[in-house]
Amino acid sequence: GNSVTQMEGPVTLSEEAFLTINCTYTATGYPSLFWYVQYPGEGLQLLLKATKADDKGSNKGFEATYRKETTSFHLEKGSVQVSDSAVYFCALSDDSSNTGKLIFGQGTTLQVKP
Amino acid sequence: EAGVAQSPRYKIIEKRQSVAFWCNPISGHATLYWYQQILGQGPKLLIQFQNNGVVDDSQLPKDRFSAERLKGVDSTLKIQPAKLEDSAVYLCASSFPGVLAVTGQYFGPGTRLTVT
C-alpha cells in the first residue's frame, strides 16, 4: 500500500543553519504531496504542497520539489529561525481513491537553538 | 474565519470506561476526518465523512469505536470500552470536497486522551 517515510529526528540546528528533512514515498498512481507543521500546543497546519512531478511547493522560506524519479519530497530551508522549532510531517494523498485521504509519515522534530 | 473546533482538549479515563470527543468543522466544509495520532507517529485516518455519509472507515476499530455526523456538520467520536493502547491525540480535520490538492485539510487542535 501507499506509505511515507521520513528521516528520524530530532534534528537540532543553530539559528541560520541550512535545513533538510528527507521524505520518500511509495504510491501507486500520481499522488499529491504535502508538508504539514505542528507547532507546540497547536494543530497541524499545511506548510506547502505539490500536485505533480517537478512541481516546487514553497511557503515561509521552506521549499520542497516533487521528484518522481526518486519518489522524494525533501523539505529545505536556507536559514532556520528559533520560531521554526516544530514537528514536520510529510504526507501524500491517495488520489486513486478520490477520497482525499492523507497518509502521513511519522514526523520529524526540529529544534533550533539561538 | 473560525478554525476547526474540538473539545475537550484533554481527557484522562480508566480502561474499560467510555469517552466521547466532539468536533465542529469549518463552516461549509462538507468533508470531515477523524485521525488518531499515537505519540511518535504520524496521524492515521480513522474515519471520513462526506456530509453525513461515511466515505472510509476501513481503519476504525468498530468493536469499540463509533462516530457519527448526524446533520452533516458537527461530529462525535466515541470509544467504548477504552483500552490502554487508545492513549493518543485524536485530531479532527475538514475540507471542501474535491479540492484537497489545492487547499489541503484544516486540522483542529486535537484531544489528548490518556487511558490509565
Image (cartoon, rainbow, N blue to C red):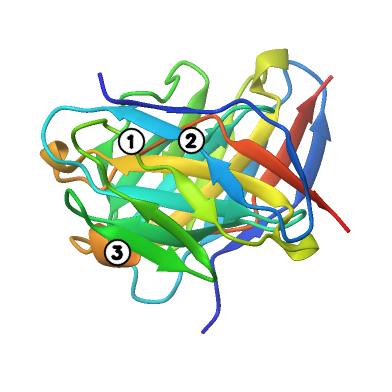
The residue that disc 1 covers is: A72
Residue drawn at the location 45% of the way across and 71% of the way down: B26
Does the CB distance between marks 1 and 3 fall below 8 Å? no
Q: Amino acid at mark 3?
A: Ala
Q: Is residue B79 visible?
A: yes
Indicate the position of residue A7 as horizontal and vertical percent values: 55, 28
> How far separated are the C-alphas under marks 1 and 3?
31 Å
How many marks are shown on the rendered structure? 3
Crowding around mark 2 (Cα neighbors within 10 Å: few <14, some 14 to 19, many 20+) is some
Disc 1, SS: loop
- Protein chain holding label 1: A
Does the CB distance between marks 2 and 3 fall below 8 Å? no
Look at discs 2 and 3 and give the one toward the viewer: 2
Residue drawn at the location 79% of the way across and 46% of the way down: B10
Q: Is residue B105 visible?
A: no
> How far separated are the C-alphas under marks 2 and 1?
8 Å
Q: Are marks 2 and 3 on the same chain?
A: no
Q: Mark 2 vs mark 1: which is more N-terminal?
A: 2
The residue that disc 3 covers is: B30
- Protein chain holding label 3: B
Residue drawn at the location 14% of the way across and 40% of the way down: A30
Q: Which mark is residue A22?
A: 2
Indicate the position of residue A58 as horizontal and vertical percent values: 41, 66
Crowding around mark 3 (Cα neighbors within 10 Å: few <14, some 14 to 19, many 20+) is some
Does the CB distance between marks 2 and 1 fall below 8 Å? yes
